[in-house]
Amino acid sequence: MTTVGGLAVDSATDEGGVGGGTVPYVGIKNIAGPANRPMPIVPLEISDGALRGIWPSVSEVTAGGDTFRLAKGELGGATYSQQWFQYCGLEVAEGLEPDPERDGFLRSKTAYDWQSQLDDGDKLRVEHFEDYESWGNNIGSDGLGKPAVATWRSQGEDVKEIQVQVLRTPVVSKMVAGEDEYSDLAGELREFLKAATDADFIAWMNRCTHLCCNPGYKTMSGSAKFEAADKVYCNCHQSVYDPFSPTTATFASRPRPQE
Ligand code: FES
């Protein structure tokens, strides 16, 4: 293992890929069920009124005799890299190739009734979420925020989809400010959230860290049985994540195919 800029990188692996290894990251906390680590946050920003995932700058890395390109940089005090998302087969997704020219906009993929007003592939825009402080869908409590499912860096024929869950919620501002029940939120997490969220939007990779299903936030009424009506619930094996509990973790990211 080689350390590059504070980031551990296993460049050569038995699987023949590059750029895997042990990686610290920030995610939404797993609070019940068999999933044993958080789902990674996807940092985002608003660009001309549309939501766009932030992609780190790309540089060439030489480690273990291999030279490869890696998207990695500092964001809100954390080391943010494409390696955060290299799990569950996503490591072979074209969208995780480091080349930053890929469209980073978060594009609607209908999962909630309200999204049917959009076509799949439309950019998600701030104006689609204007009612976020009162929105509800009869699952859990109203007013916790308005969700959407999106694809990211996934345009093109026969491209492996990278699916992201988006939530615009008043809780983001509270977490960033350390208000109310978030007064104990660590300063480093608040700093990261300030950089990784925008206009009360937060997003995370919608891929369960247990066995890779797509969980959902308020997508299944049956989630109430697992006290997950206001949480992110994976119905494959009943894992639950709390979108309002950002946390740091470490995992072994999988190598990408050699370029
Ligand atoms: S709980 Fe098993 S895949 Fe999500």
Image: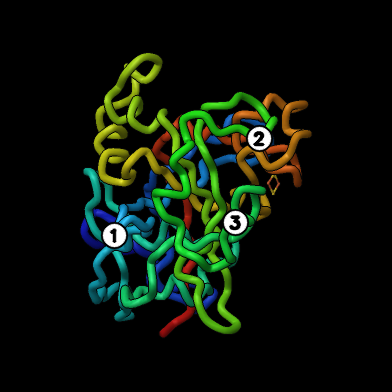
| Foreground disc of the pair 1, 3 | 3
In the rendered image, which quarter is residue 230 located in?
Answer: top right
Query: Amino acid under label 3?
Result: Gln
Task: Decide which of tag 1 and tag 2 comes sooner along the chain.
Answer: 1
Label 1 residue SS: loop
Q: CA distance from mark 3 to mark 2?
A: 16 Å
Task: Please provide percent x and percent y for residue 21.
Answer: 42, 60
Q: Is residue 30 above or below residue 165?
A: above
Tell me: 103 left or right of 151. left
Report how many numbered discs are placed on residues in the image. 3
Label 2 residue SS: loop
Label at residue 137: 2
User: What's the residue at 48%, 36% (across, down)?
Assistant: 132
Task: Decide which of tag 1 and tag 3 comes sooner along the chain.
Answer: 1
Query: Amino acid under label 2?
Result: Asn
Task: Please provide percent x and percent y for residue 61.
Answer: 26, 73
Label 3 residue SS: helix
Dots 3, 2 in contact, CB < 8 A: no
Q: Is residue 40 visible?
A: no
Q: CA distance from mark 1 to mark 3?
A: 20 Å
Q: Quadrant of the N terminus?
A: bottom left
Label at residue 117: 3
Dots 1, 2 in contact, CB < 8 A: no
Q: Nearer the viewer, residue 141 or 15?
A: 141
User: What's the residue at 44%, 70% (across, down)?
Assistant: 96
Task: Please provide percent x and percent y for residue 155.
Answer: 50, 76
